[in-house]
Image: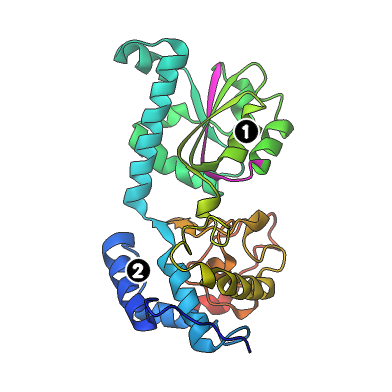
Amino acid sequence: MAHIDFPTDFPSLETMMSVLKKVFEKSWKIDLDIEDINIWLENFNGKFFDVEQERRLALWLLCNFTYYNDAEINHLCSILFKKFVHALMTDYELTSSEEVEACIGTLKFTSIGRPSESGGLILYHFRQEARLSTDCFVFPTSIAATKSDIIVCIDDVIMSGGTAQRFFYDNEEQFKNKKIYYLTILTTNKAISKLNDLNIQVISCAVLDERNRAFSEESLCFFKYPDLKEPAKIMSEGYGKIIEPKKPLGHRDGQYCFGFSYNIPNNSLPIFWSSSNGWKPIFYRKEKYQNAKQAKREYDFFI
């Protein structure tokens, strides 16, 4: 079995556990504790490296995870709305609060996909922060019937842009002759480019790049310990192939380490969120189901 030579200044298991305990309580404000970490660490049973070495790598990845709690999501939605208002004022040459309010009163907000998916879940936070009436929101299927010339799509994450691109292709008639803004908390330049090609204006809180991917050449996660990046990838991908064979490092090889209080995107590493093949996740991901058969519950979980 391969051996990992950890740098002398790399934090111990105990140190990282102590740090995470404080992060859970003070920063993430999440209902997790040391026992939850230990249960998660039991997944790493020495298939690729020594058990303790695997668990040190796993904890390092967890220490580099970005978790957005409810308060942070609300704050990001507030920023997103302010950016949108600024874009609206620029695009339509609005010069007063009265003009902005009148303009917003004529447009419609929506999400892409089903109401239960993450884009729909972010709508509640956004509506509260923007102080918008429920009358401002419509289902995607009702867009064609609305008289508004401006449609604002709300989402939390758009990475590759493929899903959004397909949505607009499939609903081309719904959006015909309408100005479309796409508001999202996190995105990438690739996604922005794809939607710009469809004449859709993207507004985001942050644009992620290769630095945000755990095992890329520019990864910030392993900036200080570059020699640990490959072992961590071998381990993450190895267990990923067992639990999520179609996306061992996340959807479309995402390699991301972030999540929201209401759900974890499947672009993030499956070792954090998958519950397949007996894996015990540190975060539970709410999967979307296409039919009742797929949604069959595992009742043992509730007992």
Q: Amino acid at mark 2?
A: Asp
**Mark number displayed over residue 193:** 1
| Image coords of residue 100 (percent x, y) | 37, 16
Q: Nearer the viewer, residue 290 or 54?
A: 54
Q: Which comes before the other along the chain, label 1 or label 2?
A: 2
| Image coords of residue 237 (percent x, y) | 64, 70
Image point (49%, 76%), residue name: 57
132 relative to 54 in the view: left or right:
left
Marks 1 & 2, CB-CB < 8 Å contact: no
Q: Nearer the viewer, residue 76 or 66?
A: 66
Q: Main secondary structure of the magenta part?
A: strand
Q: In this figure, which residue is indicated by the disc labeled 2?
A: 31
Q: Decide: is 232 above or below 198.
A: below
Does the magenta portion include 160?
yes
Q: Which residues are magenta?
A: 149-161
Q: Amino acid at mark 1?
A: Ser
170 relative to 26 in the view: left or right:
right
Q: Decide: is 251 above or below 198.
A: below
Image point (67%, 25%), residue name: 174
Q: Quadrant of residue 63?
A: bottom left
Q: Quadrant of residue 288?
A: bottom right
From mark 1 to mark 2, how far is it between C-alphas? 38 Å
Does the magenta portion include 273?
no
Q: Decide: is 244 above or below 74.
A: below
